[in-house]
Image (spheres, coloured by chain):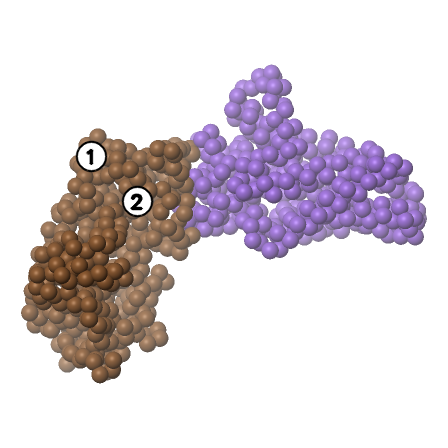
Amino acid sequence: MAIIDPKFGKKLKKYGAYEFDACYNCGSCTAVCSLSTEEDSFPREMVRFSVLGMKDDIKSSLKPWLCYYCGECTTYCPQTANPGELMMSLRRWLITIYDWTGLSGLLYKYWLVSLFAFLLAAAGVLVFGYYNDYNLESLMHYGHLFEMMAIAGVFAFILLPNIIRMWYFVILKPGLKISLITYIKDFKELLIHMFTQKRTLGCDDSVRRWFEHFILVISYLTLLFVTVFLNWFSTQYLFVNILGYVVSAVIVIVTIDFIIDRIRKKKEISKFSQPSDWLFVIWLSLMGFTAMAVRVLIDTGLLEKNVWLYLIHLIILVQWALIIVPFGKWTHFLYRSFAMYFAKLKAG
Amino acid sequence: MPGNIKEASFDALVIGGGIAGGEAALNLANNGFSVLLVEKDLSIGGKMILLSKVFPTLDCSACITTPKVSEISRHPGIKIFTRSEVTHIVKRGEKLFEVDITKKPRYVAEEDCTGCQLCETACPVIVPDQYQYDLVGRKAAFIPFSIASPRVAAIDIENCTLCGACEKACPPQCIDFTQKEEEYIVRVKAIIIATGFNLFDPLLIPRFGFGIFKNVITSMQMERQLAPTRPFNTILRPGDGKVPCKIAYVLCTGSRDATVGNPICSQICCMYSIKQAQLLMGALPMADVTIYYINIRSFGKGFEEFYEQAKGMGVNFIKGKIGKITENEKGDLILRYEDINENRLKETEHDLVVLSVGSIANHDAAAWFSDGELKLDPFNFIYQPDSLASPAKTSLGGVFVAGTASGPMDIPDSILSAGAASAEAISYLIRQ
């Protein structure tokens, strides 16, 4: 028996969804969706579940993650119920459901909490700087140490448990029996989708969007690798140095293009922006930009006199690594890939 | 030509010669009032005269309309202007309207034409026949359709090559290329607007493929194929002339759809589609007919039984609106939809698709009056300020509305509405 939460619709509106209750169940959205299939038909089912407040059914569903927001459903919805934005809101809601700490929920629902978290992170960096007398060498030393610890810590204590929770909701709880061999055999699905994001190509006329996302993800991961493991800010190797510049430039260019799209609101996907969407693109852009600026000052020997710039970079980095990555939109990257993996497992 | 303006006066003016306008004109004339009936088309009878049968009784539509049309055209109290358009209406005072009417030339002397059709045979020009909804061709010198009233030829001057063949062929020599537009100023005491509705243009929904895929037709085209005066004498799909065996109906094409600016229900499409499905089961006993719907709205008297009857006859009903239509190399069509009851996306092949097009407001009337005198509702139908107590009244005293000019409705409701409008008009006319 399905359990219904009559207040669910109202809750969902805090995550950006609106007017989805205008849906009259014609199924146009599903029928025009390029990604919907006979096995996984969406978004109408999700709209129905949301209107009725069937939370458990949404929780155990991968469909919100199978949607890549092509926007056709919203364009052609005869009731202007905006199914595309509803799916986006369900993803935001699911992020908070998967998150065992409950912090995502607070950050999504209350912008004041987000502001407080960002200020706290900034204050932390400044206090830390103060105790190190704003000495560049020790700042950079600890900054680099922080990067490594943050990656390991966030992954071990937040992301991994959250993915296990996701697995529990969609595979274990519904009682699906999947053999270990299938888990191993289908594992490549996870990697393929994580690194190529190829499902975006399923949207009609979206080669540009896919390409931007593809190079963004690759550049982001490369930047992470170059700064953390190849120590870009201290490296002597010309190749590593140039690679760092290239990837951070790509990040800045692509994210600025995304920001322009969100300001122009011409495409369905960029018409509706929640604070979490803005924070994600702007902070990613700032990350790339400040990293590049820091390296420019290192190469010109001016960083000694401009420690403030490194501090700003560190603040952005800390906010990114401790707030946006574990609790914000960054997790899309992870959950989407795992959703494709789990979907493959479910299909058998 | 200011010198040529003709003047006339009548008790009432009825604008629109469809079933609602005709009924209202008859009621007024039978009560002793003189009526001018203005019709912009070549024949009176409106859309109803072109239909096959009516729901839910399956009575022959033409057989109901033609006697009525004859009665209207022979009534001594009714003067009919076909191919005429109202251009301006001014209210000069209580029970006094001044109406400008343009009577366009037919290039045929109406009173002399015998309807022998020899001009049609002689004419070398062939163009799509709008009265058969472009399914077949007609000549540029033509009688609109066999049961037209008046059953008089006309020259389609836009396509005419002025070769003169018809002139030579015409026995009473009634073809007259020198005819000019005639301007009238008509004084009337009351006006009934019965301008009807327009069919939704499915070209506005490109993903349904109308105009691109030949075997996607409108419900009006299917209506013609089922009518007694039908073009083919059987049901054929236009692409290759094959008799279809798997027919799909796409309900709510242009109705209940905010993306095309018409969020309201057209009220007739469910029932006429069910009617056509039943007629198809009779015409093509081996054919499968599937109706794709959002909700079947069978609200009128006998409608639900009619729906059940269609189900009993074997018409398939699938809940789910069509999202996209594509064509394969055989000219068959693939319909993509979500089967709502099964919660599953599906693609199904059909060899003929009928788009059940909705009714859209014909808002010509508002432009005849000075700014804002005649108010329209949010969907461009004529606004009824007192829709419960006096549904025929408009925002302007002495101007009444009949039939689908006030909103989507079926034939019985249109006739009822015309009755209400004529009753209101009569009581307005006799009030001191």
Colour for chain A in the figure: purple
Q: Which residue is label 1 attached to?
A: B284
Q: Residue drawn at (77%, 48%), measured in percent from left and top?
A: A289
Three-letter residue code for mark 2: Ile
Residue A271 screen position, x and y as percent: 56, 52
Seen in the image, is B353 located left or right of residue A140?
left
Q: Say above or below: B194 vs B87.
A: above
Seen in the image, is A139 located left or right of residue A281?
right
Q: Residue drawn at (19%, 32%), measured in percent from left and top?
A: B285
Q: Secondary structure at mark 1?
A: loop
Q: Residue drawn at (32%, 76%), measured in percent from left and top?
A: B370
Viewport quadrant of the N terminus of chain A? top left
What crowding class fits label 1: few (fewer than 14 Cα within 10 Å), some (14-19), or many (20 or more)? some
Q: Earlier in the sequence, mark 1 or mark 2?
A: 2
Toward the viewer: A307 or A216? A216
Residue A154: mark: none
Label 1 marks a residue whose chain is B
Which chain, by letter, is brown?
A: B
As measured in the structure, the alpha-carbon distance from the residue carrying label 1 to the one carrying label 2 is 17 Å
Q: Is residue B364 visible?
A: yes
Label 2 marks a residue whose chain is B
Q: Which residue is label 2 attached to?
A: B217
Q: Secondary structure at mark 2?
A: strand
Residue A51 screen position, x and y as percent: 46, 43
> Is the residue under label 2 in contact with that under label 1 (CB below 8 Å)?
no
Seen in the image, is B397 located left or right of residue B9?
right
Residue B97 screen position, x and y as percent: 22, 78
Seen in the image, is B221 located left or right of residue B65?
right
Q: Residue drawn at (8%, 64%), measured in percent from left and top?
A: B172
